[in-house]
Image (cartoon, coloured by chain):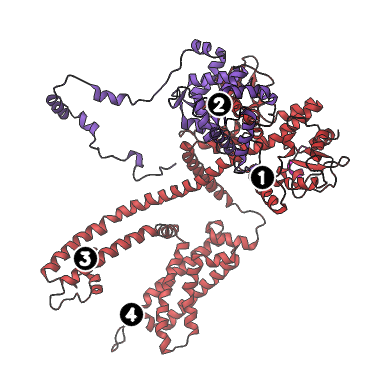
Chain colours: A red, B purple
């Protein structure tokens, strides 16, 4: 429940009088305030700055430091105030949270100091309001990245007992780790450069024999170039195999872009070795040699900048695609126009629309080779329009694309973040909602146990257990309990409902009477009386099996049961929903927590499910339960 | 951290083209002069003042002494009530939507809006669409500090939707449906479609003495006074404040 809404709880409870005349069942007892004090001002002295607020304001969130009795540790007897030796500026936000129910993140505040203060006062940062949440998350992410960078720098210190394989992989990925890695790095870089230069020089015409035409160097010094190529490919193959060996996940490595580039770079050589000197395939072989130029991409391992460029191109592919599309549209339009305009003139180079494409592209990009020029007047007019619009179409969007790219990129990031946050936000809201209803369901059991205890007048246990819910929560639960009584139906949580629905469908029982535990609310929870109620509506021994669907499927079937008892969930389940951690509902929804009544036989200790035991730390409580129910 | 938007401003600070609205036209001196010279009326400055009336509607409650006289709360209780009220509704008035939102938060599993609507009408005594602090406190005074008869009268007023002095079956069915709506879907046993109807039948069997199909205030009070559990439950919320 939100803080401000807590102020309306008395109103909601008073309005519940409207249900009373229509209720057929008696109402449960209202929780009483043990010590009804007048609301008083308390002084919080934070490093000398005094804040004052009502005690009730702080009591709204009993899970936090200020809302619980933990603040008594900070009480200063002489000055009658609570002294905290913390940052007063951040405390302002903390106190406003109690007042308004919304936690704000001040932008000028350092994120780690803010987090520390929140942790000190026991406030979960997830409840930061929507207005400040994005800023908070951004700062937090930047901080985390910074920490990660710091960590990576430290990671370079060699960790002991790394396998040879791991060492090799680290050496490959990060050449600065060891001298060997550095040497390897430079050697491979050198050979890539050599290979690329070889490919280039191969085609340069070297000096010619006197009465022969110019031959490219590749054909003149075939053997030398072949040796060079072999050497380079040897090195690349060895490198690839070593990387493959060292990779932690070979399958993932083989799928990565860099390894594909490696493979493509060395494959033509091997294919060329395998293929014979056949006339038919030599044409294909020549094209394969083109792929040797891919070796230059191997440099991207050596250059961070190339990698970033590749990544940005990949990420703004949609924008580039749109640019291309709009250019294509313009080209087609102008090419068509030019073609039809020049159709009339004789010896026109504009033989077809695709032929005009070339003219359009050359004109629009303001290249203007002059190999195709319009001759008709209409052609010249449209040609000039084409070149003018070319300036606009090409030159303008480029900076816009660049800035667009930057803006759209960030916007997309933010939209995705917001969408992801929205899901998380809705999940949080849902969790808090189910949390509050779960809290009610559990404290209902608590409340019944309390009433049982009241009858047996074991006051210390009652006090111990009643401390687990704050007064506010117990009042809220009492309100929900009254509603249940009015309508003669019970709240259950989602999983239970579906389970019992299924079971009801399967076993075809008549309409289930409301859980017997709730009937016992007012009219006595003494176990003997309850067992009497057991037997009247369900006289046969299938009473046991009736209870089964309500309980965990692992509980033992205990044959003839005479008593039922209630398992108590420990304090953690009845926390104020807003401060509930995200992982808490998981144990709440766990089936063991849905045990409302478990059936035990008297002499043996209580039988619980294994999960139940794991989740309930209050072992002795079980023993007490046995004692109570053994009346 | 770095500015996430290095290129442009966010949408909020984009330069807006000045719109040619009536308001900006009126501000133009030339226009004013033309209008003033053509219309021979006296200086009626109503047109510009009407904009000022759109300021937030605010309500200040009556003084503490008057409220103390009208209700049965002590001064401190009234202070604490007002602080809570004002915290949630700074303007001093609760409209129906806010009321529904607040009330729904107490019943997360079901839909409390219909019942909240009926409650709103029960509290909003002068039927002007918003609850002032006086209405709020007067209602609470009856509910928490009133006699049993007064409380029963209040409940009758709640059930009587059209405030004609009779509760018909349709009105009761509407109320009952709204109460069952608050339970939500996940209940045990699950709420059937005719559960409210059955409940209404039971209610009428108990309350409608002369079997004329409506329940009058006297029948209602008389029957409730005879029912012990209802009388007991009326005292339930004595020490809420």
Apparent side of residue A390 relative to residue B232 in the rendered image (left or right): left
Q: Which residues are magenta?
A: A613-618
User: Which callout, 2 or 4, points to the residue nearer the camera?
Assistant: 2
Q: Is residue A380 above or below residue A432?
A: below
Q: Are marks 3 and 2 on the same chain?
A: yes
State the SS at label 3. helix
Q: Is residue A209 visible?
A: yes
State the SS at label 4. strand
Local packing at callout 1 (Cα closer than 10 Å; few below 14, some 14-19, many 20+) is some
Q: Give how far apart the Cα atoms at labels 1 and 3 are.
A: 69 Å
Kindly identify which residue carries mark 3: A363
Are discs 4 and 3 less than 8 Å apart at CB?
Answer: no
Kindly identify which residue carries mark 1: A589
Which residue is pictured at 32% across the width and 24% down the height? Answer: B53
**Nearest the camera: B165 or A458?**
B165
Q: Is residue A94 visible?
A: no
User: Which callout, 1 or 3, points to the residue nearer the camera?
Assistant: 1
Apparent side of residue A492 relative to residue A229 in the rendered image (left or right): right
Q: Give how far apart the Cα atoms at labels 4 and 3 are.
A: 37 Å
Local packing at callout 4 (Cα closer than 10 Å; few below 14, some 14-19, many 20+) is some
Q: Give how far apart the Cα atoms at labels 2 and 4 are.
A: 95 Å
Q: Are marks 2 and 4 on the same chain?
A: yes
Q: Is residue A615 magenta?
A: yes
């Amino acid at each position: 429940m939100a803080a401000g809404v807590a102020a309306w709880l008395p109103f909601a409870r008073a309005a519940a009088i409207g249900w009373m005349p229509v209720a057929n069942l008696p109402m449960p007892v209202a929780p009483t305030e043990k010590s009804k004090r007048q609301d008083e001002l308390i002084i919080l002295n934070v490093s000398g700055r005094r804040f004052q607020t009502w005690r009730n304001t702080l009591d709204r969130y009993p899970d936090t430091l200020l809302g619980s009795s933990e603040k008594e540790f900070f009480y200063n007897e002489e000055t009658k105030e609570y002294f905290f030796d913390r940052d007063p500026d951040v405390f302002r936000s903390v106190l406003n949270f109690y007042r308004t129910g919304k936690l704000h993140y001040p932008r000028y505040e350092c994120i780690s100091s803010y987090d520390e203060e929140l942790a000190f006062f026991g406030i979960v940062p997830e409840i930061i309001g929507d207005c400040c949440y994005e800023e908070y998350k951004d700062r937090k992410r930047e901080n985390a990245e910074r920490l990660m960078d710091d960590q990576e720098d430290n990671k370079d210190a060699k960790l002991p007992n790394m396998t040879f394989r791991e060492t090799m992989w680290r050496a490959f990925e990060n050449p600065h780790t060891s001298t060997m890695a550095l040497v390897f790095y430079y050697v491979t870089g050198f050979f890539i450069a050599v290979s690329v230069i070889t490919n280039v020089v191969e085609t340069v015409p070297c000096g010619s024999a006197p009465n022969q035409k110019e031959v490219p160097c590749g054909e003149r010094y075939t053997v030398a170039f072949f040796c060079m190529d072999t050497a380079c490919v040897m090195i690349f193959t060895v490198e690839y195999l070593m990387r493959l060996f060292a990779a932690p996940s070979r399958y993932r490595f083989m799928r990565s872009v860099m390894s594909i580039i490696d493979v493509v770079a060395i494959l033509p050589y091997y294919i060329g070795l395998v293929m014979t000197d056949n006339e038919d395939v030599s044409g294909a072989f020549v094209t394969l040699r083109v792929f040797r130029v891919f070796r230059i991409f191997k440099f991207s391992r050596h250059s961070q900048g190339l990698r970033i460029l590749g990544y940005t191109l990949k990420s703004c592919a949609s924008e580039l695609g749109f640019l291309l599309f709009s250019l294509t549209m313009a080209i087609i339009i102008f090419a068509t126009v030019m073609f039809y305009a020049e159709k009339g003139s004789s010896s026109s180079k504009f033989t077809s629309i695709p032929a005009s494409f070339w003219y359009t592209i050359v004109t629009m990009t303001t290249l203007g080779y002059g190999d195709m020029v319009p001759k008709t007047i209409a052609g010249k007019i449209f040609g000039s329009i084409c070149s003018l619009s070319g300036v606009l179409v090409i030159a303008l969007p480029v900076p816009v694309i660049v800035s667009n790219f930057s803006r759209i990129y960030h916007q997309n990031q933010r939209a995705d973040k917001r969408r992801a946050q929205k899901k998380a936000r809705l999940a949080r809201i849902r969790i808090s909602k189910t949390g509050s209803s779960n809290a009610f369901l559990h404290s209902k059991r608590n409340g019944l146990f309390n009433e049982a205890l009241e009858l047996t007048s074991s006051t210390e246990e009652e006090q111990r257990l009643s401390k687990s819910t704050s007064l506010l929560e117990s009042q809220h639960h009492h309100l929900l309990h009254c509603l249940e009584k009015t309508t003669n139906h019970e709240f259950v949580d989602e999983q239970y409902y579906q389970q019992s629905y299924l079971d009801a469908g399967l076993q075809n029982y008549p309409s289930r009477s409301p859980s017997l535990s709730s009937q016992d609310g007012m009219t006595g929870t003494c176990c003997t009386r309850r067992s009497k109620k057991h037997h009247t509506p369900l006289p046969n021994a299938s009473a046991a099996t009736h209870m089964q669907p309500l309980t965990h499927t692992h509980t033992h079937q205990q044959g003839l049961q005479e008593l039922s008892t209630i398992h108590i969930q420990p304090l953690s389940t009845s926390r104020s929903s807003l401060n509930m951690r995200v992982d808490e509902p998981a144990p709440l929804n766990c089936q063991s927590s849905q045990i409302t009544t478990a059936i035990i036989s008297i002499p043996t200790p209580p039988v619980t499910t294994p999960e139940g035991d794991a989740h309930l730390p209050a072992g002795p409580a079980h023993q007490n339960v046995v004692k109570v129910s053994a009346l | 951290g770095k500015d996430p938007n290095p290129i442009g401003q966010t949408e909020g600070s984009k330069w807006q083209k000045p719109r040619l609205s009536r308001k900006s036209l009126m501000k133009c001196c030339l226009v004013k002069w033309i209008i003033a010279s053509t219309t021979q009326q006296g200086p009626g400055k109503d047109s510009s003042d009407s904009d000022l009336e759109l300021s937030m509607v605010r309500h200040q409650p009556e003084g503490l002494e008057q409220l103390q006289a009208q209700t049965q709360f002590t001064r401190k209780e009234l202070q604490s009530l007002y602080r809570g009220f004002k915290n949630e509704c700074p303007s001093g008035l609760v409209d129906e939507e806010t009321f529904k939102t607040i009330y729904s938060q107490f019943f997360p599993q079901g839909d409390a809006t219909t019942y909240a609507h009926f409650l709103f009408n029960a509290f909003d005594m002068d039927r002007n669409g918003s609850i002032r602090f006086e209405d709020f406190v007067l209602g609470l005074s009856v509910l928490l500090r009133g006699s049993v008869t007064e409380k029963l009268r209040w409940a009758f007023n709640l059930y009587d939707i059209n405030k004609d002095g009779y509760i018909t079956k349709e009105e009761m069915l509407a109320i009952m449906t709204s109460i069952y709506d608050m339970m939500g879907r996940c209940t045990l046993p699950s709420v059937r479609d005719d559960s409210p109807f059955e409940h209404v039948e039971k209610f009428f069997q108990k309350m409608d003495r002369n079997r004329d199909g409506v329940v009058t205030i006297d029948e209602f009070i008389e029957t409730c006074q005879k029912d012990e559990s209802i009388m007991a439950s009326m005292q339930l919320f004595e020490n809420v404040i």
